[in-house]
Amino acid sequence: MPEGPRASPGGEGEETEGGKKHGWAEKAAKRQKEKGQERKGEETKKKKREGGKVRHEKPPRFESLKEEPEVEKTEEGERRGGGKGVKEEEGGEPESGGDGGIKEEREGSGLGKSESVESDEKVKVENGLEDEKDTKTKAKGAKPAKRRKAKEENAREEKSKKASEKLEKEGPAQKRKTTEEGDKKKSKKTKTGENEKEKKKKEEEDKWKWWEEEKTEDKVKWKQLEHKGPYFAPLYEPLPDNVKFYYDGKSPMKLSLATEEIATFYAKMLDHEYTTKEIFQNNFFRDWKEEMTEKEQEIIQSLDKCDFKEIHKYFVDKNEARKALPKEEKQKLKEETDKIQEEYGYCILDGHREKIGNFKTEPPGLFRGRGNHPKMGMLKKRIMPEDVIINCSKDSQIPVPPEGHKWKEVRCDNTVTWLASWTENIQNSLKYIMLNPSSKLKGEKDWQKYEVARRLKGVVDKIRSQYRGDWKSREMKTRQRAVALYFIDKLALRAGNEKEEGETADTVGCCSLRVEHIKLYPELDGQEHMVEFDFLGKDSIRYYNKVPVEKPVFKNLKLFMQNKDPGDDLFDRLSTGSLNSYLQDLMPGLSAKVFRTYNASITLQEQLKALTNPEDNVAAKLLAYNRANRAVAVLCNHQRATPKTFEKSMQALQAKIDAKNQQLEEAQAELKRAKADHKAKKDVKSKEAVEKKKKLLEKIKEQLEKLNVQVTDKEENKQIALGTSKLNYLDPRISVAWCKKFGVPIEKIYNKTQREKFAWAIDMADEDFEF
DNA sequence: AGACAGACTTGGAATAATATTT
DNA sequence: AAATATTATTCCAAGTCTGTCT
C-alpha cells in the first residue's frame, strides 16, 4: 500500500543539554545559539539531506500550458553549458541581440570548433561560475548564524522591555478599570432587550455586502475595531492522585505541578508516531528537564525509564467518557462553547459585527513540526496575557485582561488587520488573531487576489515570450530567472524562499531547488529533454514529476548544474526577492505566487468547459466539476494521505453496486413479465403495471449510475486533496458561474462555511462570468 | 542591495459534528 | 440506539512577500 505523502524523518539524534533556569525567550535563544555553533560546518548540506526522502509517485501531471512553438532550431539555442556568451556580470561587450555571438556547441569535448574568442570567454564564465557559487554558499552559511544572534538579542531586549513596561503600564491599567465598569453596565443593558435586538442586528450584519461599497485603496484597514481580546486556554488541571507516574519501574513518583503538566503533554501523544522519533524524544526531554525541580532532575535521567502509561490511559479514558456522556450533558457543554464563541468570537469592525477566525490562544503542548523538523517535541509554552499585544481602536472598549493580569501592550494600529498577537517560543515568530474568511477584510483581499490573477491573464503571453527569449540571455542571472519562471508558470511551483538551515525541515521551492533535486534525461520514456523533479516542498510533501522541457531549458539546466555539488543551489544567482521585483516591473502586483493562482483558475475554467455536458444529470455534472477541481489539485501538488478507511469504504460501495445490479436485473425481468402480461390482457390495469415497472427500472438505473459515479470519483480522489485549491486558488466566480449556467445548486459545490467565505462571489457573478 | 521582521496566505492532519448503517 | 462512515471545522505549522532599515 502506498504510504502517505509525508516525509519520513530520519532518526538522527540531537545533542542534549541540561541547563539552569532561564526565562523562556532566553532559553530558546540560547538553544538556538548553541545549535548554531554545533551546526557550523558540522555537516554539509548533502550529508544532512540523505535520509529525508520519500516514496510514492504522483499521478501523471496535468499540462497547464498549451504547446508552444519550439524555439528556433538554430544552433544557438544549443550552446553548451558554460558556453561563451553567458556573462556573469553585466556590462560585457554589447553582443548582438538576444543570443548574438553565441555559436554552436558540441556535446562532450568542447574542443575543436570553438573560436578563440569564445574559448576565452568560456574560461571567464567558468571562473565566474565558481566564484558565484562560493559567494552564495558562504552567504548562506553565514546568514543563519547572524540571524540567530539577532533574534537572541531581540529576545533579550524584549525581556528588559517588558520589565520597564511593567512600570509604565500603571497608567493603562487605570484606564482598564474604568472600561471594566463600562462593560458591566453594558452587559446589563443588553440583557433586557437581548434577543430580538441582537437577532435583528445580527441578521442585518450577516448580510453586509461590503463588495457593493466603494473600495478604498488605502493602507488603513479599519476605522473602528472593538473586541474582547483572546480567549485563553484553560489552566492545567492536576492529575487525580490515583494516576501515577513511575520512574525506572520503582514506586510511583509524585511530580511537581509544572513537571507533571509537561509529562501529560507527552503522555497524551504516546500512541502517536511522533513519540518514537529520536529527535522528538530528545527535544522533549531537554525541555522537560529544564522545567523540573532540582530534585526531579536528579532522579529523572532518562526518558526511556519514564513510564507514562497510567497517565496516557487516564486521558484515553477521559476522552471516551466524554464521548459517552448523555446527550443533555453534551448539550450543556455545547452551550458553553457557544457562549464563549458568542462572547469572544466576534468583533465590531467599522460598525459591523464580524466573525473572528481564531479567537483562542494556542494551548501549551509539544511542538509538532512536519516532516523532518529539527524542533519537533520542543515545549510550546503557555501564552499569558503578559505575552499578548492587543490591537483595537482608541475609543473602543479596551478588552479586559484576565483578573490579576495585564496585557503586554495595547496599541491602535489601523494599518494592520490583526486583533491580537504574541510571539511563539519555538521559532520566535509572531502569531496573530485575525478575522474569519467571511469577513470583509479577508474577502476583499481574496477578491483582489483573483483580480490580480486576471490581470496576469492579459499579459501572460508577453511574459512567456519574454522569458523564452531570456533563455538565451548573455547574463547568467537572467537565464536562471527565465528558467525558474518557466517552472513556476508551467509546473505551478512555489517561489521557494530561503530558509534558515537547521531551524526548519529541509524543504524547497523553485528558487531554492538544489542540483540534487532534478535529474536530466536527454531521452526518457520515448520523450526528449526530460527533467525529473524529486524534492520535498511545503509541509514536506513530496513533489515528484517527470516533465519534458524545451530544448533551451534543458541546455540551461545542464549549464546551471555544471561544476556544482548535489547540495548546491540550482539557481545560485536567483532569489525570490529579485524574481519578484522583476515581476513587479512587468505588471504591478505581480509576484511568483500569482502564477499559481492564475494557472489554477484558468485550468478550472478550461476543464469545466471541456468536461461538462449540459445534458448530464446533476451527479454527472458534479463529477465533471470534481474532475476539473482535481486537475487543479494535481497541478498544485495537493496531496493527502490515503484515508485510513479507504479500502473498506470502497468495498462497501462496490457491494452496494453489486446489490443494485441485482435489483436492476430483477426489475428488468419484472418489466418483461409485465409487458407480456399486458400483451396478453390488453387491459388498463396491466398497462399501468407496465408503466410502474418502467418507472422503477428507470429509478434503479439512475441510482446505479450515481453509485458508479461515486466510485469513480472516490477512486480518483484517493490521494488528492481538493480543499486547498478550492479554498485558495480557484476564483469562486468561475464555480458560481458554472453552477448558474448548468443549473447546479451552489450547495452542491460549497458547504456553509465556503458559501460564507465566497458570499461576495456568489452575489456578484452571473452565469457568463469569465475569469 | 541585502537582511529582516512583520503580516498575511496557504496547507494537511486532527478533531468534532453529522449522516448512514447496523 | 449504537456503531461507523463521511463531512465540516478547527488547529496550527509553514509558506510568500513587502516595507524598512542598514
Image (cartoon, coloured by chain):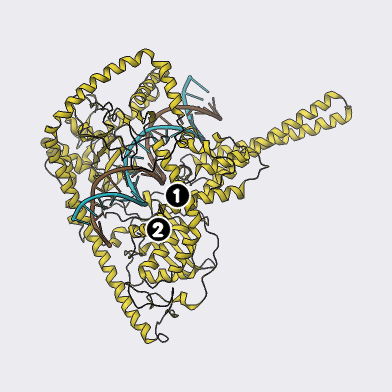
Chain colours: A yellow, B brown, C cyan
Say which label, 1 or 2, has the lower sequence index: 1
**Residue A348 found in image quarter:** top left
Q: Is residue A298 left or right of residue A306?
A: left
Give the crowd class for mark 2: few <14, some 14-19, many >=20 residues within 10 Å.
Answer: some
Q: Nearer the viewer, residue A579 or A4?
A: A579
Q: In the rendered image, which residue does mark 2 sit on?
A: A583
Respond whether the residues carrying marks 1 and 2 are from the same subunit.
yes
Residue A469, given in percent of the width and then of the height, sits at 46, 68
- Element assignment for label 1: helix
Q: Between A334 and A324, which is closer to the camera in this rendering?
A: A334
The chain holding disc 2 is A
Q: Which percent across, then down, holds residue A683?
A: 87, 25
Amino acid tagged 1: Val
Check contact, mark 1 vs mark 2: CB within 8 A: no
What residue is drawn where x is 50% and y is 77%?
A74
Q: Residue at x 73, y 33 (%)?
A: A697
Q: Is residue A86 above or below residue A154?
A: below
Estimate how packed mark 1 is, as few (under 14), some (14 to 19) or many (20 or more) residues with alpha carbons within 10 Å.
many
A51 or A731, which is in the foreground?
A: A731
> What type is the residue that disc 2 sits on?
Leu
User: What residue is disc 1 on?
Assistant: A452
**Element assignment for label 2:** helix
Which residue: 49% across, 32% down? A752
- Residue A186: give x, y in percent of width and height: 30, 18
Left or right: A87 as drawn, with respect to A386: right
Q: Find residue A746 and report its image quarter.
A: top right
